[in-house]
Amino acid sequence: MQKEKLLMTPGPTMLPPEVLEVMRRQIIHHRTADFEKTWDELHENLKCVFKTKQHVMTMASSGTGAMEAAVVNLFSPGDKVLAVSIGAFGDRFADIASTFGLEVIKLSVEWGKSVNIRDIREILADDINKEIKGILITHNETSTGVSNDIEAVAALTKDTERLLAVDAISSMGGLEFKMDEWGVDCVVTGSQKALMAPPGLSFIALSEKGWSACEKSKMPRFYWDLRKYRKGLEKISENPPYTPAITAVLAQAEALKLMLEEGLDNVYARHKKFALAVQKGIKALGLELFPDEEVSSYIVTAVKAPEGVEIGKVIKMLNNRFDIMIAGGQKHLKGKIFRIGHCGYVNEFDIIKTFAALEQSLAAAGFAFEQGAGVKAVQAALF
Amino acid sequence: MQKEKLLMTPGPTMLPPEVLEVMRRQIIHHRTADFEKTWDELHENLKCVFKTKQHVMTMASSGTGAMEAAVVNLFSPGDKVLAVSIGAFGDRFADIASTFGLEVIKLSVEWGKSVNIRDIREILADDINKEIKGILITHNETSTGVSNDIEAVAALTKDTERLLAVDAISSMGGLEFKMDEWGVDCVVTGSQKALMAPPGLSFIALSEKGWSACEKSKMPRFYWDLRKYRKGLEKISENPPYTPAITAVLAQAEALKLMLEEGLDNVYARHKKFALAVQKGIKALGLELFPDEEVSSYIVTAVKAPEGVEIGKVIKMLNNRFDIMIAGGQKHLKGKIFRIGHCGYVNEFDIIKTFAALEQSLAAAGFAFEQGAGVKAVQAALF
């Protein structure tokens, strides 16, 4: 008796039925009062999620597109930036900056750890002539299952000339983010993770300092020119500037409504509870977390593959036999870790089901443990 | 008795029920055999529509994003290009090129006319030192309802070093396009017009000459770097490079299947028949086409607003009272023309219905004509 495939991956994540219901509706035109009403609601609700008074702009692109938009709107060729990388997506942010001619000082942290704030502080302190114009950093690194403390990083740039740009693609909506209070200058995210909408939309917001950098930037930009998107939101010019991904926009508006109905604090508490339950279940099976426990992500849990077990086979069995998708490791972590996503539209029973299937698959792969121990631990933690 | 709003606009266009059925399905992961099967089918079918042996690449963006991709992949800052503009979208292509530091020679044609091939030939002939590296041109200009003869333009660049980049956003799938035979070096299009899918995807293909220019280009590019998308299609690296707009991709794959089932020649014949019927209906009402008749688009028909009639009111009445959306004029044509789209998922009765509503709305706005004459003319032309 096959049921719907359960995605326990760190994005794309599953869509609530209310969102799917919106997706099946006939297309409407974007230059209409109906669309604009939903568009305006979406943008008000995005401000709640970002915790900002600034405009949050919607673009048709993957999250990577918004990371490029951050780089080309905030900086000019030749500018020096500090790119903090704790994994594959931190590397990507640094690559984008190099591609557009920035001088990148890269602070590469061992995979599985979060950045040590002291290391950033020291680099900034050594930069006596204030040549470093800004910091690029990932909030939640899905490749390693680690979150950085953005509030602490922002404290180093807040009352300075330096800009802080944060890739919050996998965290926004799952981890609390206080853009204005923390003093973050640029935040980017995407629709397909904790925001419970289909992939294809990215969102970006700039602080006042960010906008002033945007005006001064000498980087050529057209599609990513945030000034055009802002003019649209301020009803100065056509809103939005290019044909938006209409269906995805309506779906995202619906998903945000659901999140606000649940209450953002409850959403964050749910993500934390699920993550801690997964950590307990992992330990009960005699497995080890890949990251340092205190920085292990509430979005996705990365687990070391046990010695002598071909973890690829376990992941495949979960997928092919039990219709549950979890993720393997990326780059040099392939075959060495597996990752369980628990963000967005996930409930307690999804976690329990995943552990039951994980136990069956680990046993089939020859791993020795007390059957039921994982399920018991997560159940106890969840209820 | 209200029925579904009928979009007779030049994009976004309506979605067939088969496409909507795909949209309502739960999200699937993009790194799966299921998704890759559909992804590969989509890309084979796109080659049929583009009539090319080259890879057609899919990006998550509006059509404008793909226009930017064309510019940054084919050229380097300082390169001289000829931008042919016959309306708002031709202007946009020229603006993008200027933004990225190209030296743009702009050939602006009076709105309502297509480019005169002799004018292009003369400019190229005067360019004795071959400083003009390429031509940017719109295939179908929705702002004016005019199509350019791309085959004739391509004949001027085909066996030369010069590149031809064509914005086929509103034409691809509605007007025949023979990329390889004509010798076009770069073609871009979008999902939301004749291709009958929701907005949010763009497609781009390069000729061998285009690829060789892409390798030589000194323009910084990351999200638009077509080499990454090609590597994905050639299974050299991750396919696709960034999270694709999964639902839109599946929807587009379904829509292309429908088009190929109908047969592309039949699809083109349908667009032509509907356009000629609309032209007859317009004349039967005593109205005038805005463009020169011989270049009037098969995608969208632009019509001069009759003297003394407030055309904005007519468009509003069609929309509010009859639930049929047609478009007004853009920029300086606002209030001076109206535009009836007839591309993508449109049938004979949509045209008849539109004319019945147009007659009622024109009469209410005080325009004098023989009631029923428009409907009679389109019916005769359609059946």
Image (cartoon, coloured by chain):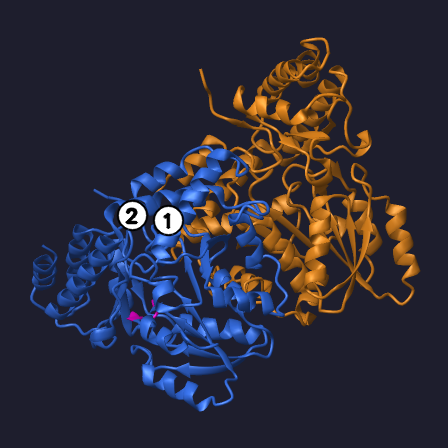
Chain colours: A orange, B blue
Q: Nearer the viewer, residue B142 or A162?
A: B142
Locate residue A14 relative to residue A381 in the image: left or right: left
Residue behind mark 1: B45
Q: In the rendered structure, the residue with mark 1 lies on which chain?
A: B
Q: CA distance from mark 1 to mark 2?
A: 8 Å
Q: In the rendered structure, the residue with mark 2 lies on which chain?
A: B
Q: Position of residue A225 (x, y in %)?
A: 58, 65
For residue B17, what is the image quadrant? top left
Q: Which mark is residue A135?
A: none
The quarter in which the N terminus of chain B is drawn is top left
A276 in relation to B63, above or below: above
Residue behind mark 2: B260
Q: Position of residue A46 (x, y in %)?
A: 58, 47
Q: Position of residue B31 (x, y in %)?
A: 55, 37
Q: Identify the main secondary structure in magenta.
A: loop
Locate residue B88 relative to residue A373 in the image: left or right: left
Span colored in magenta:
B141-146
Q: Amino acid at mark 1?
A: Asn
- Residue sticking out furthest to the front: B159
Please tell me how crowded label 1 is: few (under 14), some (14-19), or many (20+) other residues with Cα within 10 Å.
some
Question: How many discs appear?
Answer: 2
Locate residue A90 relative to residue B304 in the image: left or right: right
Q: Amino acid at mark 2?
A: Leu
Q: Earlier in the sequence, mark 1 or mark 2?
A: 1
Q: Secondary structure at mark 1?
A: helix
Locate residue A202 relative to residue B355 in the image: left or right: right
* Residue at 60% across, 32% down: A9
Q: Nearer the viewer, residue B5 or B113?
A: B113
Please tell me how crowded label 2 is: few (under 14), some (14-19), or many (20+) other residues with Cα within 10 Å.
some
